[in-house]
Image (cartoon, rainbow, N blue to C red):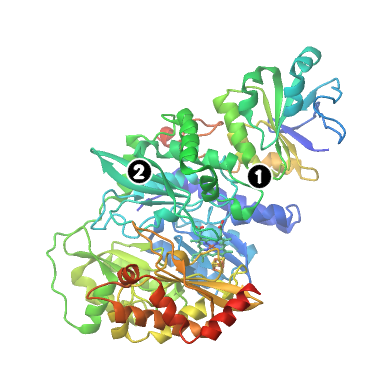
Amino acid sequence: MAQLIKDKTIAVDTWKTLELAESETPETVALPAGDIIFPLPVWQARKTEIISTCKRIGLLIQPDERVEDVAGDLEYFIVIAVNFPKFVDGRGYSTASLLRQRYAYQGELRAVGDVLHDQLFFMQRVGFDSYALKDGKNAAHAVNKGFSSFGDVYQASTSQPQPLFRRRS
Amino acid sequence: MYKYDAIDRQLINERVEQFRDQVSRWQAGELADDEFRPLRLQNGLYIQRHAPMFRIAVPYGMLNAAQLRRMAHVARKYDHGYGHFTTRHNLQLNWPKIEDVPDILAELAEVEMHAIQTSGNCLRNITTDQFAGVAADEIIDPRPLAEILRQWTTFHPEFAFLPRKFKIAISGTEQDRAVTWFHDIGLHLKVVDGQVGFTVIVGGGLGRTPIRGEVVRDFLPWQDILTYCEAILRVYNRAGRRDNAYKARIKILVQALGVDAFAKLVEEEWAHGKGGPATITQAEYDRIAAHFTAPAYESLGETALPEEKAFRRWVDRCTQPHKVAGYTAVTLSLKAHGVAPGDITSEQMEVVADLADRYSFGELRISHEQNIILADVKQADLYAVWQIAKENGLATPNIGLLTSMICCPGGDFCDLANAKSIPIATAIQARFDNLDYLFDIGEIDLNISGCMNACGHHHVGHIGVLGVDKNNDEFYQVTLGGRQGNQAKLGKVIGPSFAANEMPDVVEKIIKVYLEQRSDEERFLDTFDRIGIDPFKNRVYEGRAHGKAKAADKETA
Ligand code: HEM
Ligand code: SF4
């Protein structure tokens, strides 16, 4: 199980992510009950059904999926999980920036997949506030050091929308 | 020169501690090799042929004497007592130990130096023209904007894991000396109707698929450069290919979409960021620009120089016109014959630092041609500078000439090499050792790379040499007619490749054709443009009808 870090502490994960078996399609897959994170194609295919049956809805976005396509739906999601299939695939950082800055998404923004200690500082800066740390990693050390690598930052981004040059006295 | 404030200093100190923690977690097995790799690369640390290789940043080529002394010390204490200047304003050490790198970084941080983003798939070191601020043909000093860009690129959270490396060059002179047409983003400062801005070029690059960049915006007000670059980078980060490292550079994206469609995507993206908080303020520009004011020049007239032939020769080749009367910019050649181009020993670094302190306001520049520049020398001091430089092997009067070649580390150090490059450079230098002859030949850029990654810029050499591998043997392919500058262009391959020991002959034949064909004062490149590639081809492959066929056979084998 991935260890969840939320608001800079180790937390219990109440969410399950819907995974499709080979034989299933977004149109046919059974929609489970509970706190479910739905892959984007499932959301797109079954939106009305999901809205009418689920109290709390999560969304999973892959690196090549466009947030633009669900920009109008953001009010429905309690959590949006952005997948990093490999930690060196940096598309998720732009996804997060867009969600927070352009589409003003206010809910939980979770990094999932190959999420490592050394990416946490950057991830929090683009707007993530929860992280499903990769299995086998030292979550305590990550919480301790991963968020506080630097005391200040030069450029504007989600966590600090004013660049340093507008804040320097 | 830019001086750190408390926050800049804090950031690089924190970087040292972050990297120390990463190295120790890697040593403890908490970070796998694969996980550590991008982290160490973003800190300029490669694992190469013999040992780790470590790349220290010299942002936009500016250094002070204390920094160069520290590099001398670091090279002596942690390496073999020398370093290698690259084509991208960096100094490479070829033999440090990984476990020493945190300590090296700590020593560098004390003099405001670092290795941040000198490698890896991130925003790399910003480069510019070595004569920035003093060039007679300068329109706008690019250094304040280069520093503003440096800060913006440093630890940019959205763009630390790009599809591939990303290089930005900025030029503020009439003649481009920063190879802006061959960078991921090339920025040309200009003034239109009294307003300062940039021509923005995107998608240039050398490497295995060399492409000249395209203008995506003819004029961008300087205040908008950060928001506009964000837009370019966001488009690239999202749409750039990640399935194939060879097709991952932004140049491939620009070509695939076409420049107009690409520019349109950037404009759409920019519409959201334009005018936002990252728009540069005049106050910030002024704050940064105050670091780059002119040093305390004296009012001097032009000085008459001694007639001594050797000295005059050096002045001819190694000095550059200066904005201020009575001053000149001196290039110290790191292209002494018999030495690997760009190599400098710790002792030489110390001599150069002393020269800077005594004769050039304590500052230095690194050029992408792998030399060091003293930018503000009084003409009256030239003779003294020359004597000290000469005693220390730094006054070879060959800047711009055949033996001042650009050359990558090649097979002697680099794991990716198909062939050695340094011995080729040395052999050509040995062949053209006669200074009168060299002077007579005149301006020629000879650039050598050990593989198609093109670290030695062979595509933009008037004569380019590329190491290729055939059946595990080292061969060299020759290109002609490439050039940097405003008319930047890729060279053309002349034909089948040559063995290492043929290379001095090949170059000599090319030179002979030029000397026979040139009209008065014509430079090599002008002759080449006038007569075309065939006369050179014919001479080089003359009498090799069989050889040529044989070589061609081999190539298809
Ligand atoms: C020995 C360690 C080095 C390694 C492993 C290395 C690796 C590479 C690789 C893989 C590329 C191709 C990148 C791409 O097309 O995406 C490249 C390009 C390049 N490297 Fe190096 N390099 C090394 C040293 C150097 C040095 C010493 C210099 C300067 C002399 C340099 C300057 C460049 C330049 C200018 C390019 C061309 C970039 C472009 O496409 O415009 N590199 N290098
Ligand atoms: S051109 Fe090739 S051989 Fe030379 S340094 Fe670059 S990667 Fe190495």
Disc 1: residue Cβ within 8 A of ligand 1's nearest atom: no
Spatial CA distance of label 1 from label 2 is: 31 Å
Residue B460 visible here: yes
The answer to whether tags 1 and 2 share a subunit is no
Q: In which quarter of the image is residue A146?
A: top right
- Residue B396 rendering spot, x and y as whole percentages: 34, 79
Look at the numbered disc 2 and give the secondary structure of its residue: strand
Tell me whether circle 1 and circle 2 mark residues in contact (CB < 8 Å).
no
- Residue A60 rendering spot, x and y as whole percentages: 73, 30
Q: In which quarter of the image is residue A106?
A: top right
Q: Is residue A88 above or below residue B467?
A: above
Residue in the picture at 56% in, 80% down: B549
* Residue A38 falls left or right of residue B210: right
* Residue B205 falls left or right of residue B180: right
Residue with the mark numbered 1: A89
Residue with the mark numbered 2: B198
Which chain is disc 1 placed on? A
Q: Quadrant of residue B102?
A: bottom right
- Residue A90 rendering spot, x and y as whole percentages: 63, 42
